[in-house]
Structure formats: C-alpha cells, structure tokens
Image: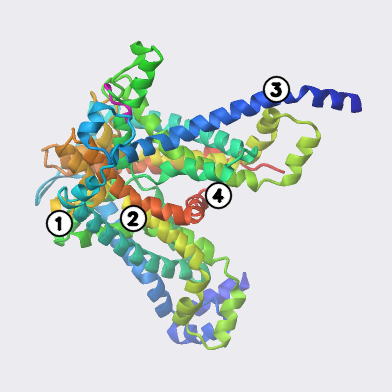
Amino acid sequence: MTASAAAREGAAPLPRLFSRGILALVLGVYTIYTLGPFLWLATMSVRTTAEISADHYAWPKPFHWEQFRTAWVDSDFATYFWNSTLVVVGAVAVVTLIGAAAAHALARYRFRGNRLIYGILFSSIIFPPQITLISLYQILVDYNLYNSLLGLSLVYISLQLPLTVYLLEGFFARIPQDLFDAAKIDGYGDLEIFWRIVLPVGMPAIATTLILNFIQLWNEFLFAVVLITDPDKRTLPIGIRAFMGDHFQDIGMIATGVMISVIPVIIAYVFFSEKLIRGMTAGAIK
Amino acid sequence: MQDTVALQAKSRSGEAKASSSTLADPRRATRLVLAIFLGPGLLVYCGLTAYPAFRTIYDSFFTIEGMDATFVGLANYRDLISDETFWIAVRNTFIWSFVAPVLDVATGLLLALALYAGVPFARFLRVAWFTPVLLSYVVVAILWMWIYNYDWGVLNVMLRAVGLDALASSWLGDPNLALASVIVTHAWKWAGFNMVVCLAAIHSLPKEVLEAADLDNCGWGAKLRYIIIPMLRPTLLSLYILAFIGKMKIFDLVWIMTQGGPLWATETVSTYVYKRAFNWNTFDLGYPSAIATVWFLVVCASVIILNRVLGSRERLEY
C-alpha cells in the first residue's frame, strides 16, 4: 500500500505538470478567443478608417479619441444613445414596479387561480416573438403609437414582464411569513406591507432584475427594427445597423459607434458582475 | 382539505366577509387589493401579449393588405405546405436547434470543470468568459463579420499565416459554410452562460460523494463519467432545453450577418417571417401570420415533448 503510494507520487510530477500545462494553454487560448475580438474592436474604435485599412491589427498610434466626438455629434449616435436611454430606463422602471407588485400578490396571497395566473404569465417566456410581433405592429399603428418611443417602451414592458415576475416571485416566496404576520399585527395595510417591507427586503433580487432587464432591453433589436422607422427615433442597435448599411466601408466609425453602445453594458457589468451572473442563472437552476 | 373548502366557501360569500377574514388570515386579501397588485401586470399581459397572439392566429385566415382584410380560410396554410423557402427555413432552424445546443452545453460543462479543478485566476476567468453573453447580437454580428472577412478577417489571416491558404474561405458567402459559421458565432456568445450555470450546479453537488470518489482514487475521466455528469443531468437537460428554445427563435444574428443568404443557406423561420411581413413588397400580413402561428405551435409542442422525453428519466436517486 505505502509502496504503491510512494511509486505513484514519484511518477506523478511529470504527467501532472504536462497536463497542468495543457490545461493552462487551453484556458489561455479560450480567454483570448472570448476577449480578443472585443479588444480588437476597442483598438479599432480609436483609429481612423485609413489607418485600419493600412493594417487591421496595429496598435492605435496615436489614439484618435476625437472619433468618439465625431460619432457622437456628426453621426447621430447621441440621438440613438438618448433614445435608447429614454426607452429602456422608462420600460425597466415600470416593468419592475408592476412585476414586483404581481410577484408579491402571487407569492404571498392564497386565492383561487393563483397558480393559473402564474402559469399563464410564465409560459409566455417560450413564445416565439413573431406570434406577437406582426399584430403589435398593426395595434400600434391603430393607436398612433407606431414609430414612437412611447409605443416601443410599452412593448418592452410586456416583453420583460414574464421574466420579472418569475424571478421576483421565486425570491418573494422565500421571505418569512412571520414578518408579514408581525406587520399585520402592527396595523400595516396590504399596500403599506408592499412598500415598507417587500420592496426593501427584496432589494437584492429587485436590483438583479433591474440590471438584467436593462441589459436585455438595451440590446433588443427585432421589435425596435419593426416598430421604429423614423431616423430620429432609432435606438442604438438599429442606429448602428442603419449606419453600417450607409457606410459599410467606414470601419473605424462603425467600431466607435459599437463601443458607444457597449460602454454602458460594460460599466454595469464591472459594478454588478456577480448580481448579473446570479440573475441570469437563477432561471436555469431549479 | 377542509381548509381549502372553507376558503372557497368564504371567497364565494362576497366582499364584506372576505375583508373581515383578512384580519384572521394574513395570507388572504380582498379582491380590491389583489386587483391593485395584479391589475397592471395582467393588463399589460392581456393587451400586449395575449391579444396580439390571438390576433395573429386570427389574422392567419385572412389576406391583409393595408386596411383591407379578406377571409381566405386555410389558403395561407395550403400555400405554406408548398412553399419551398419555408421548408428550407424549417430545416435550417431544426439543424440549429437540435445540434448546436449540444455544442453549447458541452463547452459550458468543460469550461466549468476547468474552473472547478482550481485553476489560478478562476474568478477573473469566469467574469471574462461570461462577457460575450452581455454583448448585443448587433455587436456580436458586426465583430464576427469582420472576423470572417475574406481579405483581412482574423480567421483567414491566421490560416494564411500558417500556410493553409487553401482553407481560407468566404465564410459567410459560401452556401456550404454560412450556416456553420453563424452557428459558431452563436455558440461563442452563449458558451459563458452555460459555463456559469454548470459551475453553480457543480458547486451545489454533495461534497461527500466527490470526496469519496477521491478516496477511491477515482481519476478525472471516471469521476466525470460516473459521478458528475449523471448528477448534473437535470441541470444539463434544462440548459439543453433553454438553448433549444433560444435557437428556435433566432433572428437578430442571422438578419445582420447574412439576411438569410446566400441562397437561403442561413434562412431561419424567424427571418423568413420578417421578410414576408416587413421586408418584401408583398404587403400581406396574413401569410406571415400563418407562418408565425405554425411556428408558435411547433415551439410549444417541441418544448412539451422534450420535457417529457428528457424529463422522464430525470429522477435520479442519490
């Protein structure tokens, strides 16, 4: 027993070192594979198209930060950015509030049809978007909300509602009932309980949902491209695509525009990476 | 049991009694309170999800040009059966939905195992590998169009650098390669998501089992095959189903990278619906509604069947 153990330890280092080396190599290559394209994009965003055409992989020298000013002012990316901000912030605020209210009712109160309502809301997560897309286009035209930021915002609220209710219901259901019983005894009404207990106690989960909804809507493309045609009302994803359609060769400016759209997401990720990863995985494990 | 009967009896006996019972049972609320909490959400759901969905199904029996709707019965569905482009789109979407999730989940599991094995900088690597998940499809599509560029894209530059000039191709322009190229791009975006889910699941496995395996001098291969994969089965299956659903809906990436071309090589059902509804000058919303309705039923049925088939053997005793 001891002899074989000793033999194993004596034999171990070389293959072990070898397999460690392979592992490190694979991980290194994979990291370059995921981050490399992004860094390449970042270098191109501060180089002019002429420089890029000369050598696509050179380090920026000098850094053309004025590209960002040009994209922001002359290429309308400021308009796209503020449109995106308006639509997404509005939709996220509303969907979180009404989603939280619905999740609270579903998690806390016993009433007939509770699970049915939950099931109906939740099942729409699997709907392919086309089933609502074509009619939403007609409906928004009917109500004069086509080609308007308000209309797009309303649609975004409906898109994120199922996920919001699903994530928050799971969390709110785990708040101990004692807390609610005590509040009732202290004379809190149902609405007060929601404002003064559920929202503060549920803040971590609400923050996760907020960030998740923000990123998903910030990146949304299909509904925006169908429901917005006016160039002044474009959001960032469709603005970038339109710019690319008109200036296919202007790689430097496209890269700058793409960076402008990515920066808010990266900032959110830097500050909230753990929350975000947890939020995105919460749906998958159960 | 008696409790629920009593509750139902109470709820039938009107507002007055129900409101007095809230004091007795904090789990009950008046209809007014429920309406305040659930009302806005249900209103949004009914107005912007349920109603449009029913309207699309209803519209599929009409030809709709502008304001004029003409009832045509099942004609749209009959046309659909003989629409070759539709069947190409279905085939592409099915290839993508059944094959690619295996790739995604396998990559995710291997990456998670690497992090679990305790490599240095595991925290940094986890955050780094997750980054593509957060980029929008527009950004990912533009990046990969450049990577696949024939003249100066990373892929061809690298192939030429190692002397494999013959392999350098027009990755998105060749009908035989385009679908595979777009699938690789999609896998690049989603591998990190599968990785973090697998990692969380591995960390929640009972420690004793893995330690016992270590005591038995069980190698990594055996541990993976006989312990980790069987125990992670439920997670891996739900990841597979999630990836499957995502791919049945795929639109953005294809639309920006290839618009379904070349020669319908990357056409998916979603891009085809979009083309027929908003891009071609056919001005008929009835036919695309029929495609959307069929696809809606296919997706729901597939998810139910997958859940049944994969879920039935899920119960695992540990």
Above or below A228: residue A114: below
Relative horizontal placement of residue A216, taking residue B292 as reference (left or right): right
Q: Is residue B159 visible?
A: yes
Q: Report the magenta stretch's main SS.
A: loop
Is there one chain holding both mark 2 and mark 1? yes
Does dot 3 land on a helix, a strand or a loop? helix
- Coloration mode: rainbow
Output the chain of dot 3: A
Is there one chain holding both mark 3 and mark 4? yes
Which one is nearer the viewer's eye here, A51 or B293? A51
Does dot 4 land on a helix, a strand or a loop? loop
Which one is nearer the viewer's eye here, A120 or B4? A120
Question: Mark 4 or mark 1, which is nearer the start of the sequence?
Answer: 1
Q: Is residue B287 visible?
A: no
Q: Residue at x 26, y 21 (%)?
A: B151
x%, y% of residue B48? 28, 59
Question: Mark 3 or mark 2, which is nearer the start of the sequence?
Answer: 3
Q: Nearer the viewer, mark 1 or mark 4?
A: 4
Q: Mark 2 is on which residue type?
A: Leu
Residue B253 drawn in magenta? no
Q: Mark 1 is on which residue type?
A: Val
Question: Mark 4 or mark 3, which is nearer the start of the sequence?
Answer: 3
Relative horizontal placement of residue B126, taking residue A135 as reference (left or right): right
Residue A15 tag number:
3
The residue where tag 1 is placed is A141
Output the chain of dot 4: A
Quarter of image, res A19: top right
Q: CA distance from mark 3 to mark 4?
A: 36 Å
Q: Mark 4 is on which residue type?
A: Ile
The residue where tag 4 is placed is A285
Output the chain of dot 1: A
Q: Nearer the viewer, mark 3 or mark 4?
A: 3
